[in-house]
Image: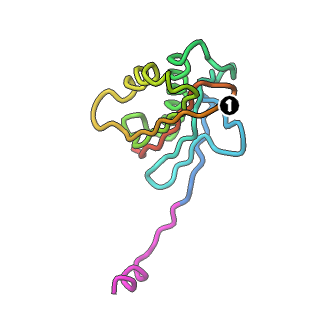
Amino acid sequence: MLISAFMNTKMSIVKAKEIKVKSAPPAAGPYSQAVAFGKLVFCSGQIGLDPKTGTLLNQDIQTETEQAFNNLSAVLASAKTDFGKVLKVEVFLTDMNDFAKMNAVYTKYFPRGVKPVRTTVEVSKLPKNARIEIACIAYLK
């Protein structure tokens, strides 16, 4: 009964839409900055690259974290959403000793309400020798 009821429903086809934004660094390979699918947007990882110069702002972990969030903000805005709609965050650090300093910056972007779920892992290396990369999934307004 359940199967026949499912088979009789009209299914709408949801297509993926690539999100491109000039105010964030372009994808450095064969991938998208973000992809919207249904009511969700999946953002590729961002590092602390200055989108105007293409250089890594690597003075310290706080500066890199701030710039990575600035880049993610531009991608989210292009998808017509923001940090208040983020559901999941993935943080990649090359040194887990930077966790507390990264977390102090991170907290500014999610100050109230339900915090997104998060995964933070240490990795051996990131593109351009960055210290941090941040990716997220958000829902669309």
Taking the magenta stretch, the answer to whether it contains residue 3 is: yes
Q: Position of residue 41 (x, y in %)?
A: 49, 46
Taking the magenta stretch, the answer to whether it contains residue 58 is: no
Badge 1 element: helix
Q: Is residue 40 above or below residue 70?
A: below
Quadrant where the C terminus sits is top left
Number of marks in the rendered image: 1
Is 7 left, or right, of 54 in this rendering? left
Is 76 left, or right, of 27 in this rendering? left
Q: Position of residue 78 (x, y in %)?
A: 52, 37
Residue at 61% of width from left, 17% of height from top? 57
Give whichever of 117, 66 is nearer the camera: 117
User: Furthest residue to the top?
Assistant: 59
Q: Is residue 48 above or below residue 46?
A: above
Q: Which residue is mark 1?
A: 127
Q: Is residue 19 above or below residue 132?
A: below
Is 18 left, or right, of 140 in this rendering? right
Q: Residues within 10 Å of mark 1 (few under 14, many from 20)?
A: few
Scheme of image coloration:
rainbow
Residue at 38% of width from left, 41% of height from top? 117
Quadrant in the rendering for residue 67 = top right
Q: Is residue 78 above or below residue 103?
A: below
Q: Amino acid at mark 1?
A: Pro
User: Furthest residue to the left?
Assistant: 113
Q: Position of residue 5 (x, y in %)?
A: 36, 82
Which residues fall within the magenta stretch? 1-14
Q: Position of residue 103 (x, y in %)?
A: 42, 24
Quadrant in the rendering for residue 3 = bottom left
Residue at 57% of width from left, 37% of height from top? 45
